Amino acid sequence: MVETKKSAAPKAPKGHVVINTERCKGCGFCAQFCPTGVLAMSKGFNLKGYHPPIIADAAKCSGCGLCGMYCPDFAIYGVKNGRKPESGDL
Amino acid sequence: MNADPRGVLTGSHFLDGDHAAAEGALAAGANFSAGYPITPSTEVVERLAGRFPFTGGTFIQMEDELAASIAIQGAVWGGSKALTVTSGPGFSLMMEHLGYGIMTETPFVLVDVQRGGPSTGLPTMPAQADMMQARWGSHGDYEIIALAPSSPQECFNLMIRAFNLSEKYRTPVLLMMDECVGHMLERVVIPSPEKIQIEPRRYTRKGPDEQYWPYSLEECNNGDLVPPLTKVGEGHFPHITGLTHDDRGYPAMNAKSQAVLLGRLVDKIRNNADDIITIEEDGTDDADVIVVSYGITARVCQPAISRARAEGHKVGFLRLVTVWPFPEKRIRELAGRVSAFVVPEMNLGQIVREVERCSQGRPKVRGVTHAGGAVHDPEEIYNAIREVMG
Amino acid sequence: MSESYEATVTDPVSAPMTCDSNPVEEWLRMDRMPHIWCPGCGIGTSVNCFTRAIEESSLDRKNIAIVSGIGCTGRVAGYLLLDSFHTTHGRALPFATGLKLASPKTKVVVYSGDGDLFAIGGNHFIHAARRNLDMTVLCVNNFNYGMTGGQVAPTTPEFAIASTTPYGSVERPFNLPYLAQSCGAVYVARWTVYHVKQLQRSIREALEKPGFTFIEMVAPCPTLFVRRNRLGDGLAALESYEENAVIKNGADTRECDLGMGGPIVCGKFVDIDRPSYLSNQVAHLRKVLGDRYVMPDAWQGVVQ
């Protein structure tokens, strides 16, 4: 059996985040506590006048879901690539 | 529906009103009570605490009356039939949760064994001075149902009636006893279970996967303003709040929602006043003067009425079994043809004001007040009757 | 995603407020979103930890009831898609007591704030813990009354500013874990909303443990407590939690006081076993009354 070396494909991120910009209130928790520095806060505004997060470096996303865990407005979540989030995921 | 035999102590008993009230609750199918000791009501919960382990019920003594009056509502949403019992100072503490019960449409029975007040007042002595608190004691606008028993037998009977009304109209019901009735020992006959009619709780027919809103009238017949209940664990996921809410139970804090909700809460009682109100009349058809009373005082009136009648006076008697909603229709009718109402009550003038309001200035209305601590001397009532007869 | 997204999201209809696969959403009443909590408020973060904990637990969703009092945290009940009760101020615990006694199969969770649970509801808290009736109490401690504008609470640190202590509070605040332990809680923990993973794990443990379990969740009130005490914003508060937290499982709760800028001792402090109210009740009545004891129908098969 051939084992794929995950680190051999640095260009393919392990996960991605989904942002609901209109629900965001711009607290910045997600960007601050993302362990891999995927997110940054936008200088732009959403319709309510808050600065939502943006993807600063998509390649770094591990899909750990910590952003969704922190988000007090339920406006962001992370997913591991290749599968839907399920019970037990952060 | 007939009563569950487990709670019915069929037979003839020698009981005081407090114990009879407890038996009434058991016969009505109550299986939960939370209480806090307070004279002169404590015997009710003492009896329940002793009896529940044999009838499949639960009693818990809480840390105060605030806790007792909300614990019973948690129990109702858990599927129980519940009551709590108190007296003056505790009744004051329970007012907030009376309002919560009205707002959330939680059926339960709250018993107030009235004693002299204000404040600690006369813990071991009677009064009927919480009658207006029963009507208006919780903040905000609402209608309430309150019954006033005159004897231990009636403590039993009206407790069942109170539970039945609370289920039928999905609302708290007050049983306004007094220390005299509560501590008076008399014969109490408890019928067999098949002779006791119980209003079953109306639960939603919706299944766990169907959309259920706790205040929606979609399962109601036209004109029925009482939405069906649910309980926890049914998969209906109701949201219950004391905030002004919409049909879904969701907070909806605006003037329109307030008008819709309060309108329905009030109308479900007002539109059914004829069903809810029970009064007893004796000799009112050709009466010149009618004595209006309730609770223990209704019995104290009897020697005075008999004496006046023996002297040839046409004295009628009207007893308020249901005090709230007030039987204004009947009092208005009678007001058109009598010369006076005499209203003895063990307070400094509460229900007499209602009689005055309904009399609209036509007949004389003479209160016979008593500050509490003892019942009236029938002589005072007799004198009042003679006085209005001129 | 680029900075240009705001140009594409101009029509609220084409930009609906729901994303159907955020794992928290299946636990929320999405028809009530967005919620009322301020930007940077920690309550929403605690809700994420809670929903993930119940998802991970063995609990059946139909058998979880959430009971809140009044206040910002009191609104949690209204947002969770569970059997949910928003009761009166301070009275979530006695309501929960009645609910649990009537329906022991239900996991009753009281989710409320520090003012609700420990000022107006303080008497109920000490008695509920003493009784050891099975329930989990999750307290969001944001050190003040948020809903009414930031008044002093029984948890406000000494000398902190609140709207009713404009020159600083001089009262000693409650040390909540110590209070809970001394009243008889069988599980006591404290985490801040910075510690999301630990908090999630702790909530799961508390939910699955019989008896009275209690978790204090330290959270920022950025609009009032944090701003008035010049502590920055919600994010700055979380950063200070990260910096000041001292994780010490099994710590002596007497040493868990919270002061302005001081250490925040976090961890699981108490995890003991003691017969719960229900099992004690049944065992005792069986012993005293024998076959004459009739267990409530709803207790059959649930209470041993």
Image: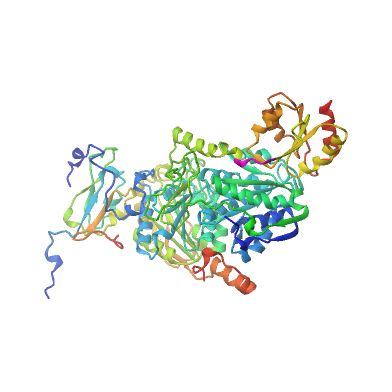
- In magenta stretch: residue B276: yes
**Residue depicted at 70% across the width and 52% down the height:** B41
Which stretch did the figure color magenta? B275-279
* Relative to A78, residue B258 above or below: above
**Residue depicted at 62% across the width and 51% down the height:** B65
Q: Residue furthest right?
A: B311
Q: Name the quadrant of the N terminus of chain B.
A: bottom right
- Locate residue B21, reporting x and y percent: 68, 54
* Relative to B11, residue B267 above or below: above
Q: Residue furthest top?
A: B362
Q: Residue furthest bottom?
A: A1
- Locate residue A13, reporting x and y percent: 16, 58
- Total number of numbered labels? 0
**Residue depicted at 76% across the width and 41% down the height:** B298
Position of B368 compared to C242: left or right?
right
- Locate residue B120, reporting x and y percent: 72, 46
- In magenta stretch: residue B133: no
